[in-house]
Image (cartoon, helix red, strand yellow):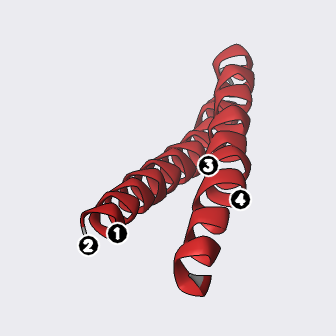
């Protein structure tokens, strides 16, 4: 019982971190379009890079490599 609770807590924490990074990345990408339209190209490019890193971290590093295997292990076992 205690082991399952710990596994669920880890899964929830990783899923929450993945969601937050993904939302932050999408927000940075959308904000970069506003700065690009306003003519602030340097900051827009910086936001694109930061947004891409956040999206990669949220979707691939946490979502695909951490959350998915834990969810499948919990579901299968």
Please tell me how crowded label 4 is: few (under 14), some (14-19), or many (20+) other residues with Cα within 10 Å.
some
Picture quadrant of residue 40? top right
Give the label on residue 1, or none.
Answer: 2
CB of mark 3 within 8 Å of CB of mark 1? no
Q: Which residue is mark 3?
A: 62
If you read the primary sequence from the N terminus, does the residue marked by circle 1 or circle 4 appear first?
1
Residue at 71%, 53% in the rendered image: 65
- CA distance separating discs 1 and 4: 21 Å
**What kind of element bears circle 3?**
helix
Q: Is residue 74 left or right of residue 61?
A: left
**What kind of element bears circle 1?**
helix
CB of mark 2 within 8 Å of CB of mark 3? no
CB of mark 1 within 8 Å of CB of mark 2? yes
Q: Nearer the viewer, residue 4 or 50?
A: 4
Q: Which residue is mark 4?
A: 64
Asked if residue 51 is positioned above or below residue 13 in the image, the reply reads above
- CA distance separating discs 3 and 4: 6 Å
Q: Which residue is mark 1?
A: 4
If you read the primary sequence from the N terminus, does the residue marked by circle 2 or circle 4 appear first?
2
Residue 16, percent from left and from top:
40, 56
- CA distance separating discs 2 and 4: 26 Å
Give the foreground label among 2 and 3.
2
Asked if residue 26 is positioned above or below residue 2 in the image, the reply reads above
Residue 37, percent from left and from top:
67, 38
Residue at 69%, 44% in the rendered image: 61
Quarter holding the N terminus is bottom left
Q: Nearer the viewer, residue 4 or 48?
A: 4
């Amino acid at each position: 019982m205690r082991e399952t609770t710990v596994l669920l807590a880890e899964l929830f924490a990783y899923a929450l971190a993945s969601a937050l990074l993904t939302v932050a990345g999408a927000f940075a990408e959308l904000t970069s379009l506003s700065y690009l339209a306003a003519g602030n190209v340097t900051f827009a490019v910086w936001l694109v890079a930061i947004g891409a890193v956040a999206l990669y971290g949220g979707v691939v590093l946490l979502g695909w490599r951490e959350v998915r295997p834990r969810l499948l292990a919990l579901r299968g076992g």
